[in-house]
Amino acid sequence: MKNTLKAKLLNSEKPIGCFFDTASTYIMECLGRTGMDFVIIDNEHSPIEAESSAEFIRCAELSGLTPLCRVRETSRSAILKLLDVGAQGLIVPDVHSVAQVKELISYAKYFPVGMRGFCPSRKDGWGFDGIGNVPETMAHFNSETLLIPQCETVGALNCIEEIVALDGVDGIFVGPYDLSISMGIPGEFDNPDFQAAIDRIIRAVHEAGKFCIFFAGSADAVVSGYRRGFDAMAYSLDAGLFIKLLKDEVSAIRDRL
């Protein structure tokens, strides 16, 4: 398993993805034909669970997309199952402290970085993908599997420099909605305090030699995010993109009738 998203990030290729909520293999195949680079299969805000995630991960791989998953919770089981079915990276919500991130690393990374439980599974072809012996397999997945905590709470913001400095943290995903809510300024993205928080996060992540992903709700916001200094952008979610496109098209048709 070669993580093409990681390779694109290292090459500063500005990858674009979206959240995947519709739980449709057909939609996943369609996304693979759009030019997007990655998808985030959402186990937090959608009905998708680990068992169905395996199906969507397989479909993403066959469609040329790097499959990431957002975990439902920060438990060992929730993290381990998604990694074992082949998620090439995890987005971890509701992070509040350095201690919590250290625990996440212990679940998601193999020895010597963490203490992830080892078992042949779909991720390595049940041991038949030719990756190597146990130490070689662990080293491979420690390198190719991305662990990306979200900075969406004041707790995470206040210790962002310590979080990104941890060995095992590959990057940070900024959730603007929940971060603004946690700061007591819900949706006030132009608020100077919120803008200062974004600057702090980007600076801390890049000083640690890691990468930073941001969520954007429009094409203009994607472009602005890259100009701001983010390394990858998650553009909306599949359901929202589908609704907006058809809504705009239907409105344009009605205007012409």
Image (cartoon, rainbow, N blue to C red):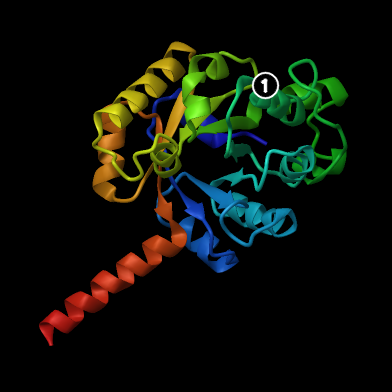
Q: Quadrant of residue 51?
A: bottom right
Say left or right for 236 vs 66. left
Q: Residues within 10 Å of mark 1 (few under 14, many from 20)?
A: few
Say left or right for 108 vs 170. right
Where in the figure is residue 10, as x and y percent of width and height? 47, 23
The reply to whether residue 155 is in sight is yes
- Residue highlighted by disc 1: 99
- In the rendered image, the quadrant that contains the C terminus is bottom left
- Vertical side of 22 occupied by 182: above or below: above
**What residue is drawn where x is 57% and y is 31%?**
148
Give the residue at the far bottom of this rendering. Answer: 257
**What residue is drawn where x is 46% and y is 44%?**
37
- Vertical side of 187 occupied by 4: above or below: above
The reply to whether residue 7 is in sight is no
User: How many numbered circles does the render carry?
Assistant: 1
Q: Quadrant of residue 141?
A: top right
Where in the figure is residue 174, as x and y percent of width and height? 44, 35
Which residue is at the front of the view, 239 or 149? 149
Where in the figure is residue 128, as x and y percent of width and height? 85, 40
**What residue is drawn where x is 25% and y is 73%?**
249
- Vertical side of 32 occupied by 129: above or below: above
Which residue is at the front of the view, 124 or 242? 242
Say left or right for 101 vs 76. left
| SS assignment at label 1 | helix
Q: Amino acid at mark 1?
A: Ala
Give the residue at the far left of this rendering. Answer: 256
- In the rendered image, the quadrant that contains the N terminus is top right
Where in the figure is residue 5, as x and y percent of width and height? 52, 35
